[in-house]
Amino acid sequence: MRGLEGKRVVVTGGTSGIGEATCRRFRDEGASVVSIAADDGEDNIVCDVADAAQVERAFERIGAVDVLVANAGISIRSPFLDIREEDWRRVLDVNLTGVFHCAQQAARRMDEGVILMTASTNGLTGHESYADYNASKAGVILLARTMARELAPRIRVNAVCPGYVLTPMQRAEYTDEMLDAVNERIPLKRHADPTEIAALFAFLASDDARYITGAAIAIDGGETA
């Protein structure tokens, strides 16, 4: 991708799944990458993105930023009537408020730059047993679109909306039978690989995407079609 060599990139949730693949992709493009995550990892700053003070300290350590991929997120599979308030709050705190904290800190440290957010097709259409997760991802999409208007032309902001991706989080919540049933409903008949989501992030951060901002881009194998 054009224009990524030497860029200073921050990826949240960069120790597994989409985040880990995104760190590897940007490093392959010649970028300097720092991961922010709740657990230890290579070139990682340990930080709970839901905690504003921790996020501020993390970005103070990092300094100037060219690209932020706000990817950290959690899900707790539960029917709507069984969702506990503490689980609702934790999902919203990490998935939406955490994105806000990181985006605000990154934007304050950018001369010109790109902020990308991991939303979801769950933020575009309803999915059973994920009301809290769905609400958080819908919020991410509108946060990205609002920021795109306010921060232009200095900073571009986009939301990426993956469908089903074969990540450790997905494996933990779905049996093999459930995965097979999902694949049957997807036109391309499979889950995405995390590297495919990482490739979209790299494109959107590159000079090849310099006219794309305020978008919510589905990458879902045709699921929402």
Image (tube, rainbow, N blue to C red):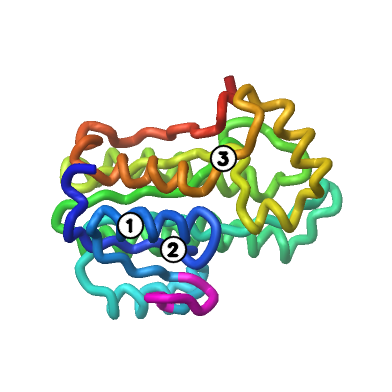
* Residue hosting label 3: 192
Q: Which mark is residue 12?
A: 2
User: Looking at the picture, how far across and down is residue 106, in whole percent?
Assistant: 29, 62
Whether label 3 touches label 2, CB < 8 Å: no
Whether label 2 touches label 1, CB < 8 Å: yes
User: Looking at the picture, how far across and down is residue 32, in whole percent?
Assistant: 25, 65
In this view, 116 is above or below 97: above
Helix, strand, or loop for circle 2?
strand
Whether label 3 touches label 1, CB < 8 Å: no
> Could you tell me which quadrant the C terminus lies in?
top right
Question: What amino acid type should be assigned to the residue bearing mark 3?
Answer: Ala
Residue pictured at 36% horizontal, 41% vertical: 158
* Residue hosting label 1: 68
Residue 44 included in the magenta stretch of the image: yes
The magenta-colored residue range is 37-45
User: Looking at the picture, how far across and down is residue 152, in whole percent?
Assistant: 21, 41
Left or right: where 118 falls relative to 124: left
- Nearest the eye: 160 or 50: 160
Prevailing SS of the magenta stretch: loop
Residue 108 visible in the displayed image: no
Residue pictured at 79% horizontal, 55% vertical: 83
In this view, 222 is above or below 213: above
Left or right: where 204 falls relative to 87: left
Q: CA distance from mark 2 to mark 1?
A: 8 Å
Question: What amino acid type should be assigned to the residue bearing mark 2?
Answer: Thr
- Nearest the eye: 74 or 35: 35
